[in-house]
Amino acid sequence: MKKIFLYILVILQILSCGNSDSSSIAIEGSIDYRQEMRNFVIDISEYAKNKNPNFIVIPQNGVEIITKNGEPDGELAYDYINAIDGQAQEDLFYGYEDDNIPTPVEEREWLISFLNRLKQEGKKILVIDYCWDNHKIDDSYEKNYQKGYISIATCRELNCIPPYPPKPFNENDNDVYTLQDARNFLYLINPENFDTKEEFLNTLENTNYDTLIIDAFFEGNLLSINDVERLKYKKNGARRLVIAYMSIGEAEDYRYYWKKEWNKNPPEWLDEENPDWPGNYKVKYWMKQWQNIIYGNDSSYLDKIISSSFDGVYLDIIDAYEYFEEKENR
């Protein structure tokens, strides 16, 4: 009887909503949050690569969705894996419980079991460890290097070029045109320490990192094609990649798309504020209204990134599915 009642309820909702997007009427318990995230990333990738076949897509965290059952030995979700070019993982060796603290072995090995399967499928693995003691930084780089990953040991605020080591680990004089060519990367998405855009650009220009992962905006203004093209050359003159950060599992109230009225009258797809990051709000990422903000039209976030000639996109809050799974089980 319960199933019949729920079915009738869905039909009534459909009839009452007219032409509303069907994804907005899914009832609690009927959504596969992990598959919805896979679908979202696949759609973003297909859209971007249709405009630029060489466009790079790198999700951060949420690596468990590479298998259909979320287990390290599970069947691979090849439709998802084929849509991405690499995988980024935070806190692999340092930072899982606290910065500068080694990640517990059990957690580390769990993540590595997924990362290695992706590596076997030809995907580049990027690791961000959060530590500041020089010997721990050395240890982070060495352990990631031994695994065949590229990595950076940096500050949690992601607002700095790490002062140690004084040059990129595994520095590379060669041109970098694909993610597979990269031997190192810089992850700096918070340019708050730079007073002007010119200072920011000049500082990054004078580095030899193979890949720059940065925000597409500086003080709310989209970086131009000329800005991005300047960054595509290392200090040594060789080419490199410039990748734009984009959160798809949370909305940020400092972005161009944010509307002030949402603070008092939030749209249906907007959920709770992240208590750890004020101004960041969980989103029902499977809903078309949110997805329209992210990709698919001239004013979308992804289209702005593509129009500024970034080489790819770095997708954050992939693990948003965990929030909704936990919320459903409360």
Image (spheres, helix red, strand yellow):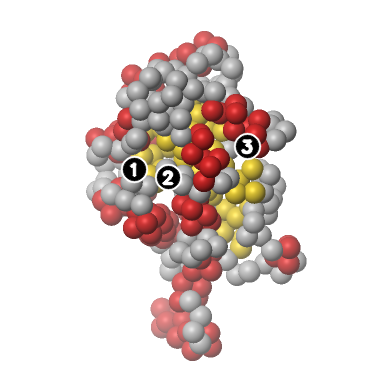
Can residue 237 be seen in the rendering of this structure?
yes
Q: CA distance from mark 2 to mark 3?
A: 18 Å
Q: CA distance from mark 2 to mark 1?
A: 10 Å
Q: Nearer the viewer, residue 216 or 28?
A: 216
Q: What residue would you read off at disc 2?
A: 312
For marks 2 and 1, give the one nearer the viewer: 2
Image point (42%, 45%), residue name: 312
**Label 3: how many Cα within 10 Å (few below 14, some 14–19, many 20+):** some
Amino acid beneath label 3: Asn
Q: Residue at x 58, y 45 (%)?
A: 223
Residue under circle 3? 190
CA–CA distance in space, label 3 to label 1 = 24 Å
SS of the residue at dot 3? loop
Q: Is residue 55 above or below residue 37?
A: above
Task: Work out whether residue 29 or residue 240 is closer to the camera in this orientation and state it.
Answer: 240
Mark 1 = which residue? Answer: 85
From the top left corner, tell me how far across and down residue 124 is, in percent: 33, 35
Contact, CB < 8 Å: mark 2 with mark 3? no
